[in-house]
Image (tube, helix red, strand yellow):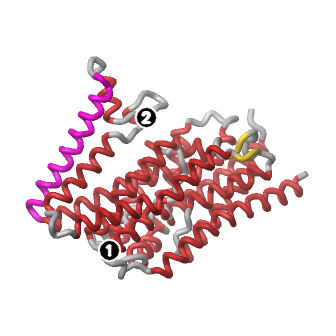
């Protein structure tokens, strides 16, 4: 039997988590995936917000478990977040992200949530999880260089007149198909686990070496996707590029849901222990929050990203989305909270510099980096300070 006070606290924490999911849907998972496509005039702002909400919901349910577990149980050692600590962390992070949404600046959601959770966890008496922090910081630092570098190289290749576009774009699509063949989904795995197409094929063909089967499936998926896009480009190069751009935006939106929902739900996990609530049901609730945020608040941020950072065309948009999808799935696989704003903005800037950098706003870029770092420090400080003050008052 759950005490009334415990239930009331859980409901408050759940409301804070839903608000956090709304803020993420409005400012990160809802705005970043289709921003390049909107910048390239491949889709309208309102339609992008609608579609990204649905895809984010699907990603949250099918891929959200890894990051949710990491945020909820792996950021602090030797301590479990109390209901009060969870509420403080969620409200602190959600308010900061919401401020970024309404101010028009893409606050790095992962920075904010991680800072708030670590802050309240240390104030609670927990120990730092240095090994996890090293993984997180390594990815955060690598994202601008890896994502921006790949986007720069891809955009340069697409702009090179010596490389036929009818060949380069299908090859890039094949690369996306190869990655997709190795992405893990819960619908492909046994109950409680996820599996990829390569993993399913290897299990179905035990008489062959698993590595050989995996390579074969990966190459087959790459060839199939490349062939489909090559055929599409034959009819109309402009329409083929637009279709590829929209497909990439959809994949990034799905990946965003799988990663970002954990930022809203992670602090809730310790509170779920007294309740018999399946994790998939919790992920569905978080995904619904992302969907509401995408439908109601994302258009503002989509406009900011698509127009303020760089004047994007289809080629640079494709160059920005390919590394975004790859980095997002890497973060989901390893259960590392990552900011989609950092991923997509870095890729947009990298692709912009491939055209000489004339369309990149240096001042906007500088303010954004300061906002990212400031959100981490401010969330940590507020999380630690507010929980300490509340704890004193409740004693």
Q: In terms of secondary structure, what is the magenta stretch mainly?
A: helix
Residue 174 location in percent, x, y? 23, 49
Splitting the image into 4 quarters, where does residue 204 fall? top left
Residue hosting label 1:
312
Which stretch appears magenta?
209-236
- Of all residues, the one furthest to the front in this rendering is 162
Q: Nearer the viewer, residue 384 or 295?
A: 384
Q: Residue furthest right?
A: 395
Image spot of residue 376 (x, y percent)? 64, 63
**Percent from the top left, x then y, of residue 361?**
44, 80
Decide whether residue 81 is among the magenta residues: no
Left or right: residue 185 compared with residue 129: left
Q: Residues within 10 Å of mark 2 (few under 14, many from 20)?
A: some
Ranked by sequence position, the earlier of labels 2 and 1 is 2
Query: Which SS class for mark 2?
Result: loop
Disc 1 element:
loop
Residue nearest the observer in this picture, 394 or 71: 71
Residue at 29% x, 62% y: name it. Answer: 154
């Amino acid at each position: 039997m759950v005490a009334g006070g415990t239930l009331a606290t859980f409901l408050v924490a759940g409301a804070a988590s839903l608000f956090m999911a709304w803020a993420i849907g409005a400012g990160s998972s809802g705005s970043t995936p289709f921003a390049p496509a909107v910048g390239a005039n491949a889709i309208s702002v309102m339609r992008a917000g609608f579609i990204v909400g649905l895809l984010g919901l699907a990603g949250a349910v099918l891929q959200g478990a890894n990051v949710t577990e990491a945020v909820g149980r792996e950021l602090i050692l030797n301590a479990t977040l109390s209901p009060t600590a969870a509420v403080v962390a969620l409200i602190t992070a959600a308010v900061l992200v919401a401020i970024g949404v309404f101010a028009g600046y893409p606050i790095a959601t992962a920075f904010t949530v991680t800072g708030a959770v670590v802050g309240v966890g240390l104030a609670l008496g927990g120990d730092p999880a240095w090994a996890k922090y090293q993984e997180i910081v390594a990815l955060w630092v690598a994202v601008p260089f890896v994502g921006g570098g790949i986007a720069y190289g891809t955009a340069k290749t697409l702009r090179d007149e010596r490389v036929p576009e009818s060949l380069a774009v299908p090859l890039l699509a094949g690369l996306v198909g190869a990655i997709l063949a190795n992405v893990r989904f819960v619908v492909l795995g046994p109950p409680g686990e996820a599996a990829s197409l390569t993993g399913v094929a290897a299990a179905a063909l035990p008489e062959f070496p698993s590595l050989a089967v995996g390579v074969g499936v990966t190459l087959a998926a790459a060839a199939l996707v490349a062939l489909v896009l090559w055929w599409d480009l034959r009819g109309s190069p402009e329409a083929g590029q637009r279709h590829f751009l929209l497909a990439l935006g959809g994949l990034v939106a799905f990946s965003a849901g799988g990663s970002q929902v954990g930022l809203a739900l992670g602090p809730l996990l310790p509170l779920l222990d007294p309740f018999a609530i399946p994790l998939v049901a919790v992920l569905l609730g978080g995904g619904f929050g992302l969907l509401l945020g995408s439908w109601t608040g994302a258009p503002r941020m989509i406009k900011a990203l698509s127009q303020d950072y760089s004047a994007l065309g289809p080629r640079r948009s494709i160059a920005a989305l390919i590394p975004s999808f790859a980095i997002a799935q890497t973060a989901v696989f390893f259960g590392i909270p990552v900011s989609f704003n950092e991923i997509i903005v870095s890729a947009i800037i990298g692709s912009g510099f491939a055209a000489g950098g004339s369309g990149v706003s240096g001042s906007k870029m500088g303010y954004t980096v300061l906002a990212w770092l400031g959100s981490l420090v401010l969330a940590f400080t507020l999380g630690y300070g507010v929980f300490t003050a509340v704890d004193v008052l409740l004693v």
